[in-house]
Image: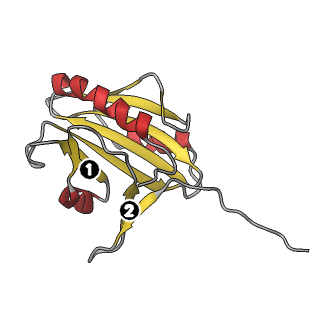
Amino acid sequence: MIALCLAPAGAEMLQFPAPDGTKSWPKLETIDEWHQDLESSMKLAANVIIPDGEDPATAEMKIETRGFPRNGRSLAEFIAADQAANPGITAQKQADIYDRDKIAFTVVTFAPATAANWKTVGYAEEGDILLAFTLIARSKTTHDKGLVTFADVIHKYAKDIPW
């Protein structure tokens, strides 16, 4: 008798060797008028995309996508830990956004108490990977403009994206 033990399938993560270890992040579809900034992606270990024509250092907004090993955590624990790591902010739950596989991303907007960055994070789980897709903007106005692209990134995301 042969027993098969299958690990839960996870998100498709792109892997890149770097001097300080392997960097990985979720694979994304191309987003019109946005591009990946590879230098920021390698530095932050995230798939960082910015509007075309923007300098990464001065971009008014960017989207960072990350995948984290579950390590026994539930999605609720992952979200709670992220909220606890952002003291002084107001967290507000938004409507879920669904990816191409019909997986719900739990969406939370973090409003700063002072003139800090606005963030909206979409959280989801893909097997043994916890996903965090984050819109970061320097102002509420820019943040609100970026929400359409943020939702588009999630809508186009799928566990397996062919190239």
Q: Can residue 86 be seen in this view?
A: no
| Residue drawn at 35 percent across, 47 percent down | 65
Residue farthest right in this picture: 1
Query: Residue 93 in the image: x percent, y percent?
Result: 43, 24
Residue type at numbered disc 2: Ser
- Quadrant showing the C terminus: bottom left
| Residue drawn at 55 percent across, 58 percent down | 71
- Quadrant showing the N terminus: bottom right
Image height check: is 85 above or below 70? above
Q: Distance between the residues labelled 1 and 2?
A: 12 Å
N-terminal label among 1 and 2: 2
Residue type at numbered disc 1: Val
| Colour pattern | secondary structure
**Would residue 81 be found to the left or right of residue 21 on screen?**
right
Residue with the mark numbered 1: 48
Query: Residue 80 in the image: x percent, y percent?
Result: 47, 39
Asked if the residues shown at circle 1 and circle 2 are in contact, with their CB atoms under 8 angstroms apart, the answer is no
Image height check: is 63 above or below 9? above
Residue with the mark numbered 2: 24
